Amino acid sequence: MDLKEIQNLIKFVANSGVAEVKLEMDDVKITIRTTLEGNVTEATYLQMPTAQPALQPAVVPQQIAPVATPAAPAPPAENSNYITIKSPIIGTFYRKPSPDKPMFVEVGSTIAKGNVLCVIEAMKLFNEIESEVSGKIVKILVDDMSPVEYDQPLFLVDPS
């Protein structure tokens, strides 16, 4: 059972009004408890490895109200002429090469193709992210020293 199926099961149980559901499969045990007063769902997920002793259950409280969705892009009319530079890897985003050095780029900086925009640390390796376009930095979408995901927007560039 993958994470998406578990999340769907939690949503289904929370909306059904059932107080508790237990699901046991070959190597997975899931218990979902809901309370109607605070709309809180508590899920216990236990995966039983075959060669190791049983793992302790992990309790994940989750608010049922609105489901968290990825950040919506800004209105297309505003950003339609901008190019988005995205993260090519997962890691930690840094705007400086080191703490005592200046930022690679600021809002308003003019960049050329091949300029280093930031550094992303992944597994103790610092990867320089170079621009694939020329233009002007309009917006920096990630805070310094923040974790970033693959394909997450980092910068908005005006190519004109």
Image (cartoon, helix red, strand yellow):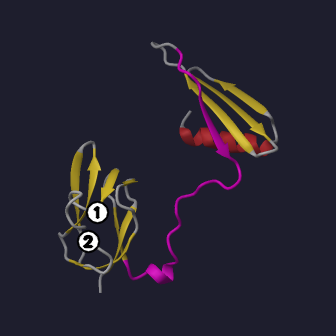
Is residue 42 rendered magenta in the image? no
Is 125 drawn above or below residue 130 in the view shown? above
Distance of label 1 from label 2 (alpha carbons): 7 Å
Residue 58 highlighted magenta (yes or no): yes
Residue at position x 17%, y 69% in the image: 114
- At a point 71% along the width and 53% down the height, the residue shown is 65
Image point (32%, 56%), residue name: 93
Label 1 crowding class (10 Å Cα cut-off): few <14, some 14-19, many 20+? many
Q: Which residue is mark 1?
A: 95
Residue 11 image position (x, y, % from top left): 69, 45
Q: Quick check: marks 1 and 2 in contact, CB under 8 Å? A: yes
**How busy is the neighbourhood of tag 2: few (under 14 within 10 Å), some, or many (20 plus)?**
some
Residue sticking out furthest to the front: 100
Q: Residue at x 75, y 38 (%)?
A: 34
Quick one: quadrant of the C terminus? Answer: bottom left
The residue carrying mark 2 is 105
Q: Amino acid at mark 1?
A: Arg
Q: Position of residue 103 (x, y in %)?
A: 25, 67
Checking the image for residue 132, the label placed there is none
Q: Which residues are magenta?
A: 54-82
In the image, residue 68 sits, relative to residue 34, either above or below, namely: below
Q: Residue 96: image x %, image y %?
A: 24, 62
* Secondary element at image label 1: loop
